Image (cartoon, rainbow, N blue to C red):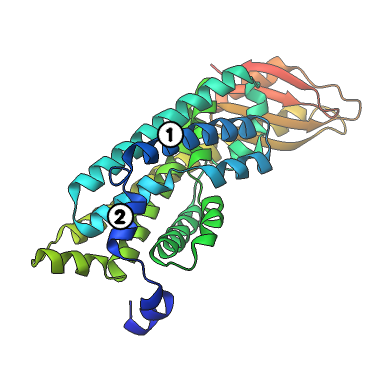
Amino acid sequence: MPHGVLTYVLPVSQRRTLDQLTADLDLGAGEVKAKRSAFWTMLVLSAIIASAGIITDSTATVIGAMIIAPLSTPIMAVALGLTRGTSALVWRSALFVLGGMVVVVALGAAVSAILPASSGALVGNSQITGRTSPGIFDLVTALATGFAGSIALARRDVAAILPGVAIAISLVPPLAVVGVCLGHGSYASALGALFLFLSNLVSMVLAGTLTFTAAGYKAEVMERRARRDRRTSVGIGLLLVLVALPLVGNSVFTAAVSTYARHAEQVADDWVAATPGASVSDVSVVGRDLRISIQTPDGAIPSTQDLLDELDARTVPGLHVTVVTTFGQTVDVGTTG
């Protein structure tokens, strides 16, 4: 980054010291017991809130969970550890991230058992469908949010934007979606949400590492050690590779889902063609759930067995099929075999 731009984005007078940044991000430094207690308490509460908001399809509730979620702290600590070339900080923080992932997913599954919803309801749930198919715009958002968060951490005067950063980056909600979908046996949807989380995670670490390095923290460490260290450069290179992996996996996943949906739509159109005035208004696939919405003059539907037979012949096995009628009634058709 050009020096003039850097000093504009991060003025020397507002730059926090390396020790101050480490004290805020490292859960193994300073008042360790208090830091870890706060981390786990707020993570558990944010996971419960996010899971309930996802199941009830409440955007406001999910946003509340984002604001209090502390998972970005160890994630940015990983970035700082890579910048400093401190493997102990990287591994310690990575273990907190991994432990946090397990806790949120487990709580998501538990809350889904307490507040059950049908598999068909998951298909129409915007909190789930919006987090099971990450794309390039999600990557751009994650990178921009990572830069915003790391700059806010490195400056003394813009800490007030951190709640906004927490809302912009999606960390706990995708993990809660993983748990909820696993609790309902929707494994493909759970995998898609996991891809989103991993994309966001790696993007944040990459953005944080680049920002902290540009801010001079690596140079400060090198001055203290009086030697060069190439681990940060190697870490950044690995992160670039890791950013690409979830997106490639998701591209394959999205292509498969699009194929299922296209074939199912053709089958559905043929299925209602013999009914005068009937039409297919929507076909959606979320994980292994296929929902077909139709409009008919009297609300009646053709033989669902005929639909299932055609889907058996032209789509993959294991899709759970439901039909939503003109008056909103949901009919369970069965599972393709």
Badge 2, how many Cα within 10 Å: few under 14, some, many 20+? some
Mark 2 → mark 1, Cα distance in angstroms: 19 Å
In the image shown, does 15 or 184 lie closer to the viewer? Answer: 15
In the image shown, does 55 or 272 lie closer to the viewer? Answer: 55
Q: Is residue 232 left or right of residue 325?
A: left
Amino acid found under the numbered disc labelled 1:
Trp
Amino acid found under the numbered disc labelled 2:
Thr
Q: Is residue 5 left or right of residue 313?
A: left
Identified at 31% across, 48% down, the residue is 26
Farthest residue, direction left: 227
- Element on which disc 1 rests: helix
Residue identified by numbered label 2: 22
In the image shown, does 233 or 15 lie closer to the viewer? Answer: 15
Which disc, if any, is residue 40? 1
The vertical placement of 221 against 190, above or below, is below
* Mark earlier in primary sequence (2, 1): 2
Identified at 37% across, 71% down, the residue is 15
Identified at 53% across, 20% down, the residue is 110
Q: Is residue 330 left or right of residue 39?
A: right
Q: Position of residue 323 (x, y in %)?
A: 72, 25
Identified at 54% across, 27% down, the residue is 180
Q: Position of residue 218 (x, y in %)?
A: 22, 65
In the image shown, does 131 or 302 lie closer to the viewer? Answer: 131
